[in-house]
Image (tube, grey):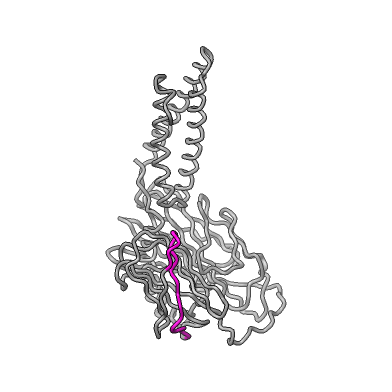
Amino acid sequence: MRTQRDSPPQRTQRTQRFFKVVLCILCVLCGGELFAQFQMPDPKQMAGIPRPVTDLPDGSISVRLIRGQLSNNIASHLVELHFANGRVLKVNTDDAGRAQFDKVPAGERVKATADVDGEHLESQDFQAPSQGGIRLMLVATDKNAPQPAPEAPAVSGTVSLSDNSRIVLEPGDEFVTAYYMLELVNINTNPVNPSPPFAFDMPRGAQGTTLLDGSSPIARTKGAHVSLAGPVPPGRTVIQLVAELPVDTGTLDLAQTFPAQLDHLTVLVRKLGETKLSSPLIERQQEFPNNGEVVIGAMGAAVPAGKTIALSLTDLPHHSPAPRVTALAVAGAIVLGGVWFATRRQKTTALDADRKRLLTRREKLFGELLKIERERRNGRSDDRSLARREELMAQLEHVYGALDDPDRAGAPA
């Protein structure tokens, strides 16, 4: 039997819990040097992103309104919460720039908006939680902030991946989710066109490669290929990726090459059961507790550009593909049998109008079901698509019953 995978909200919450200890682990492994290099992100990169929290009452949504920087709160300003059905709640921000909406019905699709000095701000659409609350931030432009100097012309040069870069692996039942947190460093005062170009492919078999929020706008993905759409600006450029690697056995071998030097290799693995990590490039590793789970933290020396980073995960939880293959074979045999039966019937007698309608509907429903199944394997399904899948299965059962029973051929599908 195929194990049901987490829904997108469950996966998001689980991943957020997993990353709570990442900075602590890196700090231990690096001897505390990480905090000296850490820089606060641009608030604009965090604007409008809902963040589940447990320090708010159930069903509460807190919206913080700032201008430019975290220290510049906007007090006594109207914030609106828009529901999908058109309902709107309005609350003014307090002295800390926060507007809190309480007792929002669980499951409602909502988004927060505000208008500041003629600038319209709005959050992502999100679902009101049944447990805990949501915090998010709306960031207005600080028109009094110093304007950046004109950008210098781009030059040819080299970039490197700082020791803030890391590979995070999160095993599941049938997939290992790989997160790449990459920080490109350009030490020049001018933007740089990297030589060689900064472009690479995710490991073989990677599915659904996606850029995460907070990535630089010059980062691009096309399938499993990652590239840059322009020169690398001076300073630090963040590229955050996620992809899934299928696992049919208890072992996963991952090989990755970057076109720039990686200053230090850092790998984090959420340990399930007896999962083990090994690599010829790892110099030391340690296990850390994480809310009842265990995380493996490993580090290695610098990795030159073009050198393959080989990682091996063993003793992974997995399910044999035999039942799935058997089920698909049986389903295929049923479909082929149905096609053969329909063809044979056509040779002996003409199908009436109702039977033709049933055959056309069967093909349409089956095609839509296959599309939903492909999206589910690529992790793009949601509650709506799962509900639609159940409807399609029920309708197909009705259609097949009508096709098999001539007395039901004229019944409405």
Q: Which residue lies most toward the top here?
A: 348
Q: Residue at x 46, y 59 (%)?
A: 178
Q: Check if residue 256 falls in the magenta segment.
A: no
Question: Does residue 179 appear in this view?
Answer: yes
Please state the horizontal and vertical placement of residue 279, each as a whole percent of the image: 44, 60
Q: Identify whether 186 is placed above or below 180.
A: below
Q: Quadrant of the N terminus?
A: top left
Q: Which residue lies most toward the front here?
A: 87
Q: Which residue lies most toward the left here?
A: 292
Please state the horizontal and vertical placement of residue 270, each as a whole percent of the image: 36, 61
Q: Identify whether 393 is placed above or below 187.
A: above
Q: Identify whether 143 is placed above or below 29.
A: below
Please state the horizontal and vertical placement of residue 122, each as a whole percent of the image: 50, 70
Q: Residue at x 58, y 72 (%)?
A: 160
Left or right of 102: which side holds 150?
right
Q: How many marks?
A: 0
Question: Does residue 301 appear in this view?
Answer: no
Please state the horizontal and vertical placement of residue 295, each as a whole percent of the image: 35, 64
Left or right of 80: which side holds 222?
right
Q: Identify whether 337 is placed above or below 175.
A: above
Which residues are drawn in magenta? 72-88
> Which is nearer the eye, 199 or 118?
118
Image quadrant where residue 269 sits: bottom left
> Which is nearer the eye, 250 or 78?
78
Left or right of 202: which side holds 106?
left
> Which is nearer the eye, 325 or 106?
106
Image quadrant where residue 80 sits: bottom left
Q: Quadrant of the C terminus?
A: top left
